[in-house]
Image (cartoon, rainbow, N blue to C red):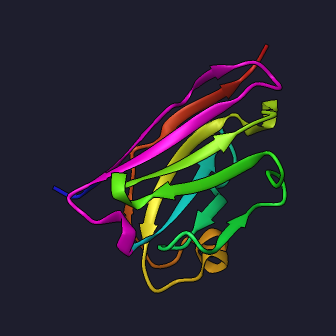
């Protein structure tokens, strides 16, 4: 069964850190570009960060640049999102997604060519 499973979400105070993980089963994650997307209550989904299959290329939303870092370990079939200096506006459900034949910019901007989505992990930033 092909699936992506996110973990690492939770409640954190403003200024705190979390590390999200996206682990794949049933597929070789190294064959795919991976994106992290988020959706806050009442807002549209947005692409947060995307990474190419090799890890050579990354893309970040302007709102998270300098605070979030995407990385991948293809040997572990896992992609990570290190989240530092978290703000209340980072509160959302975070989803990882796998896509092919797409650039990281296009993937994050349009969510095109995404074949698989995870179920999401909730991040709440609050004091």
Q: Residue furthest top?
A: 127
Residue at 52 percent of width and 77 percent of height: 112
Q: Position of residue 21 (x, y in %)?
A: 48, 42
Of residues 103 and 78, the one nearer the viewer is 78
In the rendered image, residue 115 lying in the magenta stretch gets the answer no
Residue at 41 percent of width and 72 percent of height: 32
Q: Position of residue 74 (x, y in %)?
A: 39, 61
Q: Residue furthest bottom?
A: 101
Of residues 89 and 71, the one nearer the viewer is 71
22 relative position to 40: left or right: left
> Considering only vertical position in the picture, is 122 above or below 24?
above
Q: Residue furthest front?
A: 75
Q: Position of residue 121 (x, y in %)?
A: 49, 36
49 relative position to 67: left or right: left
Residue at 66 percent of width and 54 percent of height: 44
> Considering only vertical position in the picture, is 18 above or below 43?
above
When asked about the image quadrant of residue 62, the answer is bottom right
91 relative position to 120: left or right: right
Q: Position of residue 48 (x, y in %)?
A: 67, 56
123 relative position to 115: left or right: right
Of residues 66 and 38, the one nearer the viewer is 66
- Label count reads 0
Where does the N terminus fall, quadrant-wise? bottom left
Where does the C terminus fall, quadrant-wise? top right
Residue at 70 percent of width and 68 percent of height: 59
Q: Which residues are magenta?
A: 4-31
In the rendered image, residue 9 lying in the magenta stretch gets the answer yes
């Amino acid at each position: 069964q092909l699936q992506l499973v996110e973990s690492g979400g939770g409640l954190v105070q403003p200024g705190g850190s979390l590390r999200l993980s996206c682990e794949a089963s049933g597929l070789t994650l190294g064959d795919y570009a991976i994106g992290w997307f988020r959706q806050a209550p009442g807002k549209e989904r947005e692409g947060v960060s995307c990474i190419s299959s090799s890890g050579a290329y990354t893309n970040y939303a302007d709102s998270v640049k300098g605070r979030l870092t995407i990385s991948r370990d293809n040997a572990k079939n896992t992609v990570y999102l290190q989240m530092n200096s978290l703000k209340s506006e980072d509160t959302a459900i975070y989803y990882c997604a796998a896509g092919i034949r797409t650039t990281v910019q296009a993937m994050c901007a349009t969510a095109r060519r995404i074949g698989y989505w995870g179920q999401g992990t909730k991040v709440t930033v609050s004091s």
